[in-house]
Image (spheres, grey):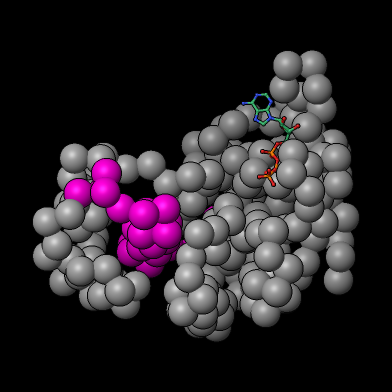
Amino acid sequence: MNIKVEALSKKINGTMVLKDISCEFASGNIYGIVGKNGSGKTMLLREIAGLIRPTKGSISVDGKMLHHDISFPPNLGLIIEKPDFLNYLTGFENLKMMAEIRHCVTDDKIKDLMKKFSLEPNSKQTVKKYSLGMKQKIGIIQAIMENPDILILDEPFNALDEDTVLIVRNLLLQYRKDGKLIVITSHHREDIDAICNHIYCMEEGQLIAAN
Ligand SMILES: Nc1ncnc2c1ncn2[C@@H]1O[C@H](COP(=O)(O)OP(=O)(O)OP(=O)(O)O)[C@@H](O)[C@H]1O
């Protein structure tokens, strides 16, 4: 798959938060975006995911323009900002509810993924009592469980312990081998350097290739 961003600008409340960005993302690659707080990383991911409209320019996925030909990139796994779930349900119940929208993930697959991330699928603990890292794990599982072709992950390593960081790194490297298209942001340069084969730096709304 190919995502093409062409002369993309986004103005919010009179401020240009993305400035004339042109770039391409292709399957079989992991793209990393680094940059200071407020530089525009999340905003660019929101644009690519089809969650907000460009002020100028366009984004197309395999030649189909977002907001014209398609509403969202097809087969997309997404984490944007802090994961937010239904507090009164358990982790498994939250994932099962999301899986029921498209009916393409079995209970066993959800349970296997939870175990891979050291979460107990049969636990009665509700998400309200989950730690930040446990919620982040549920966020990652919901993003990957439907085996998407495109993964857009904003700060996927946030709040994760060292073992889980390694699990996620290895998973993403395997996905790259499987031919998926992955875009991540992170403030942890080691994580970006460990898995990304293309690195960009966002500076005040402008995207600059860093390698
Ligand atoms: N809902 C909003 N309304 C108005 N401006 C916003 C909104 N969300 C973000 N911004 C502005 O857009 C700019 C880019 O924000 P963005 O969240 O993309 O930064 P970021 O690079 O992801 O930062 P961080 O590293 O802190 O996550 C910032 O100047 C921010 O103040």
Where does the image place residue 40, in percent across and percent down from the top left?
Answer: 74, 41
Looking at the image, residue 99 lies above or below residue 196: above
Q: Is residue 2 visible?
A: no
Q: Position of residue 162 (x, y in %)?
A: 51, 76
Residue furthest to the top in view is 14
Q: Position of residue 58 (x, y in %)?
A: 71, 38
Q: Position of residue 184 (x, y in %)?
A: 62, 60
128 and 41: which one is in front? 128
- The mark tally for this picture is 0
Choose between 36 and 3: the one closer to the eye. Answer: 36
199 vs 96, left or right, is right
Residue 112, image quadrant: bottom left
Left or right of 6, for residue 72: left
Quadrant occupied by the N terminus: bottom right
Asked if residue 120 lies left or right of residue 210, the reply is left
Magenta segment includes 138: yes
Does residue 104 show up? yes
In the figure, 95 relative to 51: above or below?
Answer: below
Q: Camera-side residue: 104 or 198?
A: 198
Please state, as top left, top right, bottom left or bottom right, where the C terminus lies in the image.
bottom right
Q: Which residues fall within the magenta stretch?
A: 126-152
Q: Is residue 23 left or right of residue 106?
A: right
State which quadrant residue 192 falls in.
bottom right
Q: Is residue 90 magenta?
A: no
Q: Residue drawn 48% across and 45% down?
A: 82
Residue name at image x 78 percent, y 32 percent: 17
- The residue sitting at 18% across, 45% down in the picture is 89
